[in-house]
Amino acid sequence: MSNQPLRSSRAKEALRQARKAFNQNELHVQRWFRLKITLGYATVVILAVILILSAVILLNHHRFNHSTVFWAGRTLFRDVPGVVLTVWKITLHPQFVALLEPVIKN
């Protein structure tokens, strides 16, 4: 009989630790989601600005010197797809999703 309170206190402590781990995991998932959304929107805005500037330079190539047109073309056709692929692989890939799952396994 004296062993019963010990089991009860161990069970309470295990439950407290499981709740704490779950809450920490929940906070991690929330922060990761916020980071992904922020990075996604920032990438869209930055890429739109880069695309517009590069397109203006390439369409009005007679107004700019040769090296400026070269770098605008390089940025448009090499750097922009690289940034898009990098952001996709790091944060927006659908298989790379942090899931919230139970801490206690049966």
Image (tube, rainbow, N blue to C red):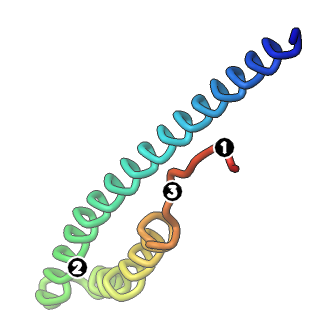
* Residue that label 3 marks: 99
Relative to 103, 40 lies left or right:
left
Q: Along the line of sight, which residue is nearer the eye, 55 or 45?
A: 45
Question: Which amino acid type corresponds to the residue marked 3 in the rendered image?
Answer: Leu
The mark nearer the N terminus, 3 or 2, is: 2
Instruction: Give how far across and how far down residue 91 sits, in percent.
Output: 46, 64
Q: Secondary structure at mark 2?
A: helix
Relative to 53, 105 lies left or right:
right
* Residue that label 2 marks: 54
Question: Which amino acid type corresponds to the residue marked 2 in the rendered image?
Answer: Ser
Relative to 29, 59 lies left or right:
left
- Tell me which residue sits at (58%, 47%) in the image: 102
Instruction: Give how far across and how far down residue 93 sits, in percent.
Output: 45, 72
Instruction: Give how far across and how far down residue 101 sits, in percent.
Output: 55, 51
Q: Secondary structure at mark 1?
A: loop
Residue 104, numbered circle: 1
The mark nearer the N terminus, 2 or 1, is: 2
Residue 11 vs 55, above or below: the answer is above
Nearer the observer: mark 3 or 1; the answer is 1
